[in-house]
Image (cartoon, grey):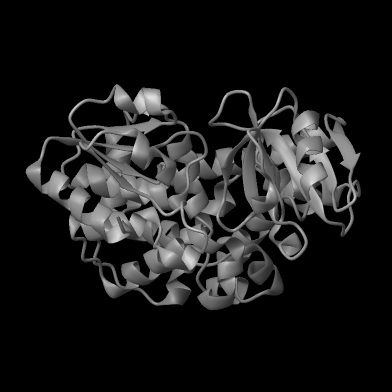
Amino acid sequence: MSWLDDVLKASRLIKSGGFVAVTHGGTAHADDTVAAALLRRHGAEAVYRLNTVEEILEVGGGVVLADIGDAFRDKLPERYAVLDHHGVSDPSEEPSSVVQVMYAVGARPTPLVATLIHFLDLFDRYGPGAKRWAGPYGNSLNNGLTKYFSDFHGVVKDEKFLDLVAEAVYARLEVDLPAFHEAFKLAERLPYADAAERFPRTFQNLRLMLSAARDPVAAAATKEAYETGFGVDFGAYAVLAVPELEPYVLKGLEKYFGDAAKAVELVTSGRYSLLRGDAAVAVAVEDNTPPAPLWNALLDTGVLSNEPTIIVVRDRRTKGAYTVWRPDRYASVIDLRRLKGDAVVFKHVTGFMAVVKASTAEEAAEYALRQL
């Protein structure tokens, strides 16, 4: 069965009405956030964020799952349609879940929105490396949308948020790229300006947003933007096209940069373990803080330098498991697809992260280091 067969199956479910939508819990991403909003707009009676087969099987009726993992397909009855792209060895083989959902619901956005979602799709599949194709586009205010959506588990009760995101997909606002500076003025209302000066890598996205509030095209063309994947994105368009989304995105950005502040606190208080293997250094933390800001905080404070590194943190989705992550700059020397064994729960098709069952973060780090 190809992904197009899954799209056709989902389309039939959607057209028949009376279906519900499910995406994964834990950390949200732009593709599952927008996909959930579109499914809600096109008739989903409820939207759930769930992680296990057992939870999903409790959901009655026809179910469309987006970005939940191809592994679920063979474990669920015929009444479920799974739209996902994680089961392929090459990310070019299938579009991300949001594109599959757009096909399933028959979405017809404007050229500008279609372009922004196209790059959302590429960043989801290829990570920051997609910046080499993206020019002024990238990932920025999407972080506010996704961080807000991350707070929900089980049924998503804030249906208004989903309605507004879907409204942005279908909005007809046409603006030139320099006009996006108005969207980035949200960053000026965040309380982290002093921290951005003291920890420039950890708060790099904030500094780029503040620069984009003056000139988004110039900010998106810098070396820093290229390295981090920063640029104009769907979230920036959404707050321009649907002003009611501003407080949601602002709240999400406050939490997103709150993770950066938490990473700084973890590092400066010494709440981490440093392990050295033959191929890499591992930093293990008994917390579910996002790994990217943690790595940047370790660089800002001089704990790490330019050496192949993996970051191990408690996984947000799987109990008794840890996320193993590596920065994109080490893609040529660290490929987490090499991890094998019963302890491995998940491996991303691009090799930048995996989920490993372990008793402690140090144990997960040692497990990964032995196989790199």
Q: Which of 309 and 6 is in front in this view?
A: 6
Residue 250 in picture, x, y percent from top left: 49, 44
The reply to whether residue 56 is in sight is: yes
Residue 201 falls left or right of residue 133 = right
Residue 364 in picture, x, y percent from top left: 74, 33
Residue 13 in picture, x, y percent from top left: 15, 44
Residue 336 falls left or right of residue 95 = right
Residue 371 falls left or right of residue 275 = left
Q: How many labels does the image show?
A: 0
Single out the residue that lies furthest toward the left.
Answer: 16
Residue that appears at 44% across and 31% down = 51
Which quadrant is the N terminus positioned in?
bottom left
The reply to whether residue 135 is in sight is: no
Residue 225 in picture, x, y percent from top left: 64, 68
Q: Nearer the viewer, residue 124 or 91?
A: 91
Residue that appears at 50% across and 34% down = 26
Image vertical order of residue 50 relative to residue 211, above or below: above
Q: Which of 74 and 106 is in front in this view?
A: 74
Image vertical order of residue 303 relative to residue 180, above or below: above
Residue that appears at 76% across and 55% down = 201
Residue that appears at 82% across and 43% down = 370
